[in-house]
Image: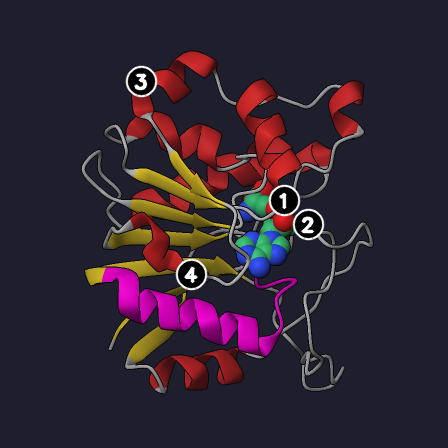
Amino acid sequence: MSQPSSAQEQQFLGGPPEVFEEVGREQLAALLQFGLAPSSTVLDIGCGCLRGGRWIIPLLEAGHYCGIEPNAEMLAYGLKSIVDPEIIRIKQPRFDHNDRFDFSVFGTKFTHLIARSVWTHADKPQIGAMLDGVAQCGAPHAVLLASFRPARWYKRDDYKGVGWVGRSHESDQSGMICHSFRWIAGACAQRGLRASRVDRPIVNGQPWIAVQRA
Ligand SMILES: C[S@@+](CC[C@H](N)C(=O)[O-])C[C@H]1O[C@@H](n2cnc3c(N)ncnc32)[C@H](O)[C@@H]1O
């Protein structure tokens, strides 16, 4: 599938249909930049309808892709219509629907974690929970790649509210938020992690942050 059809546009696909393929491919490209290999173990946080998973799953050994997605309907759509069923049969991806950012459910130490268009909706305690998960369930040289929308001091748009903003298992309302890189770097440092901006072309207005052990 290259671009979603009009029927698929009825379904929330994780972002604008016109960049569906580009944003998905970008997720694989960013992971490859950080050493993704068939033996890597990947956690896709908020994997949605597998916009990125459809590119990542085929490259990995069986059982090495795990996805967390509380919106069970969205994931079911992806498994039915976005990823080739034969790939699912061979690669045996694993999924969980918890919305607590509990990464321990898979019993795996992850070499790569990815959160595409997730920090653009998550509040600061939720980002903190994801960073705790990296510290607990990341392999020694793990990397988390998270896309975000940088807050600008002159706009005072660093999100300080409480709760997820945008579509989810609990809401049909769209919305996006910004976080300051300075805050993210501080939250990482508190957990023995280091945040750095990733040198890649910015797709759909969201640069990547790489989080690794300090
Ligand atoms: C904008 S979509 C991006 C989906 C996917 N990463 C992609 O690139 O297509 C954000 C996703 O985060 C999911 N989400 C919402 N709350 C979550 C939570 N507490 N834990 C994990 N994922 C959550 C939403 O259901 C949605 O699928």
**Within-10-Å neighbours for mark 3: few <14, some 14–19, many 20+:** few
The image quadrant of residue 12 is top right
Of callouts 3 and 2, which one flags the residue occurring earlier in the amino acid sequence?
Answer: 3
The image quadrant of residue 173 is bottom right
| Residue 102: image tag | 4
Question: Decide: marks 4, 3 in contact (CB < 8 A)?
Answer: no
Q: Which residue is mark 2?
A: 169
Mark nearest the camera among 4 and 3 is 4
Of callouts 4 and 3, which one flags the residue occurring earlier in the amino acid sequence?
Answer: 3
Looking at mark 1, is its residue's CB closer than 8 Å to ligand 1?
A: yes
Q: Which residue range is magenta in the image? A: 118-138
- Whole-percent x and y of residue 212? 29, 68
Three-letter amino acid code at the position of disc 1: Asn
Q: Quadrant of the C terminus?
A: bottom left
Q: Which residue is mark 1?
A: 71
Of callouts 1 and 4, which one flags the residue occurring earlier in the amino acid sequence?
Answer: 1
Question: Decide: marks 2, 1 in contact (CB < 8 A)?
Answer: yes
| Residue 135: image tag | none
Question: Decide: marks 3, 2 in contact (CB < 8 A)?
Answer: no
Looking at mark 4, is its residue's CB closer than 8 Å to ligand 1?
A: no
Locate residue 203 relative to residue 91 in the image: left or right.
Answer: right
Q: Quadrant of the N terminus?
A: top right
